[in-house]
Image (spheres, grey):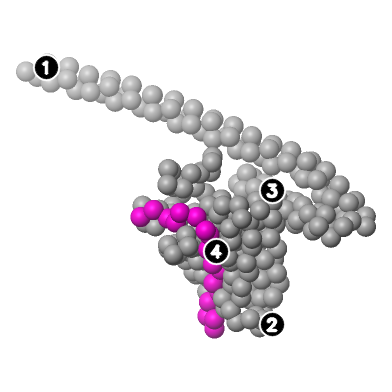
Amino acid sequence: PAQAQVRELQAALTALDTLRRELAASLQDQWAGEQQKQALLAALAHDLKTPLTIISGNAELLDEDNLPPAQQACVQAILRGARSAEDYVTHLQAITTGLPPAASAQTVSCADLAQACAALGRDLTAPKGITFSWQTDPHPLPDRALSLDRTAFLRAAENLLSNGVRYTPAGQTLDCGLRLTAQRLFLWVQDSGPGFSPEALAKAGKLFYTEEPSRPQGGHLGMGLYSAAQTARAHGGGLCLENTSRGGRATLWISIS
């Protein structure tokens, strides 16, 4: 019996050593894969600057011409989109270098924020043939200074608006607005689509969640609402989804007290 126990112990030790080697090899492969992915993302972020420079440069040349109002509006939309993309690329480059996302709270006027959100809505709805309706409460908004990360807030607004545009048929209306109270700022987007499923109401805002097939995604990976929710939480707020008689409604709020 003693010899049998020794053999069993030796077999167990051999098995553990085999597992150790296999685990070490697996971890090394994963680390190499992560390093390669990070290097590819860094290269892509760097290479994206070239086409963005071409786009913004040509748009700036067009902006100098005496264009008709409709074409001038399109050029301004291109310039705004290119500037936003350049900000995103800069943020992506910081992430790929291993630096933590920098908090960049700024003092922003409420009127400036409303103007930027309204411009985003018009830029996204016009090419889709969707009517954009913009509202503020109170109207007009007071000239109040807010402390927030302007780039992150506008990125969250863009995600909510893109989500609304995706589910609003051409010829219908996408409603959006800002509501300011003493302690909170609300951004809401109301689409004219089929509304959120019960599962979406419970899970939307989680990483990589999509609600196929009730609201087809068209290749989207469920990052938009998650990103918007993260921005809201970083500002002491949250994200709320609900259904109305017209469709789905998303409301993001942040604390400004």
Write the start and end of the magenta stretch as one range. Answer: 181-198
What's the CA distance linking mark 2 and mark 4? 23 Å
What SS does tag 3 mark? helix
- Give the number of the disc on residue 143: 2
Please tell me which residue is depicted at 47% across the width and 60% down the height of the picture: 247
Q: Amino acid at mark 2?
A: Asp
Please tell me which residue is depicted at 53% across the width and 52% down the height of the picture: 167
Q: Which residue is mark 1?
A: 4
Please tell me which residue is depicted at 69% across the width and 82% down the height of the picture: 143
What's the CA distance linking mark 3 and mark 1? 64 Å
Q: Nearer the viewer, residue 214 or 131?
A: 131
- The image shows residue 241 at horizontal and vertical percentages of 44, 62
- Give the number of the disc on residue 57: none
What SS does tag 4 mark? strand
Please tell me which residue is depicted at 51% across the width and 69% down the height of the picture: 253
Q: Describe residue 177's horizontal placement relative to residue 13 as left or right.
A: right
Q: Which residue is mark 3?
A: 89
Residue 153 seen in this snapshot: yes
